[in-house]
Image (cartoon, grey):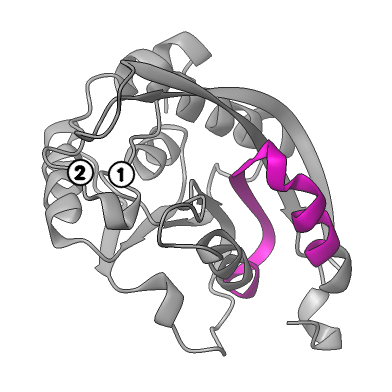
Amino acid sequence: MKKLKLKELESCLQQADDFENPKLLLEQYPTRPHIAACMLYTIHNTFDDIENKIVADLGCGCGVLSIGSSMLGAGFCVGFDIDADALEVFNKNVQEFELTNIDMVQCDICSLPDKKPQKFDTVIMNPPFGTKHNKGTDMTFLKTALQMARTAVYSLHKTSTRQHIQKKADEWKVKMEVLAELRYDLPASYKFHKKKSVDIEVDFIRFSCGKKMDGGMI
């Protein structure tokens, strides 16, 4: 497989279709190609957690993180999302890129059973930030991801919640490392948005799973 450079990966991800009619209650905002490419390139090159690995993408939306993982040589990717419309766009993207190592599951991440088998090497996600009517959703996603991953979880969270997330990571006995502080360019997606775009300060975080389940921490 050809080794993609960062700019090549970003260029490919820019070709993926996005939400046609984003749903406010699901906090559907696209993961910008630049941020997605930087996340995946770091996961791949710094930690070797993508190539030949089984990867889960929670709250996958239209699939940009799964598609990028596949392009970087993931063994297999599974995207999970509650929204059938988003998964339809995701499936269209997969077909257009002619990728064969991606599957998708329609489900509510927040309602998955408590005991989830650790079938994935790596979990990557851009979860709902838990704003509007979804307070706490980000932590529910994180808890689920930690139960699904064997090695590591990579996630985006609002920088303003870092102290709270660190407290929960300590409680769950999980090592948390902020890999980068990013500015998430949030485009105007809904009628109530007054500005064309807003920059939100976001942490790109790696959570090391290791043998966390042995102690029954979650």
Q: Circle 2 sits in a helix, a strand or a loop, which is it?
A: loop
Q: Say which element carries label 1.
A: loop
Q: Amino acid at mark 1?
A: Gly
Residue stretch in magenta: 146-169
Going by the image, does 89 lie left or right of 116? left
Q: What amino acid is found at the position of numbered circle 2 in the picture?
A: Pro
Marks 1 and 2, how far apart in space? 14 Å
Q: In the image, what residue occupies the spot 57% across and 66% down?
A: 145
Q: Is residue 147 magenta?
A: yes
Foreground disc of the pair 1, 2: 2
Q: Quadrant of the C terminus?
A: bottom right
Q: Position of residue 161 (x, y in %)?
A: 70, 48
Name the residue beneath numbered marker 2.
22
Q: Quick check: marks 1 and 2 in contact, CB under 8 Å? A: no
Q: Is residue 78 magenta?
A: no
Q: Position of residue 154 (x, y in %)?
A: 62, 48
Compared with 110, 1 (above or below) is above
Q: Residue at x 66, y 28 (%)?
A: 45
Q: Quadrant of residue 87?
A: bottom left
Q: Nearer the viewer, residue 109 or 167?
A: 167
Residue 153 percent location from the top left of the image: 64, 55
Q: Can you tell which mark lies on residue 206?
A: none
Q: Which residue is mark 1?
A: 63
In the image: residue 24, left or right of residue 85: right
Compared with residue 28, is residue 203 higher up or lower down, i.e. above or below? Answer: above
Q: Which circle's residue, 1 or 2, is located before the other in the chain?
A: 2
Q: Residue at (56%, 70%) from the top-left corner? A: 140
State which quarter of the image contains the N terminus: top left
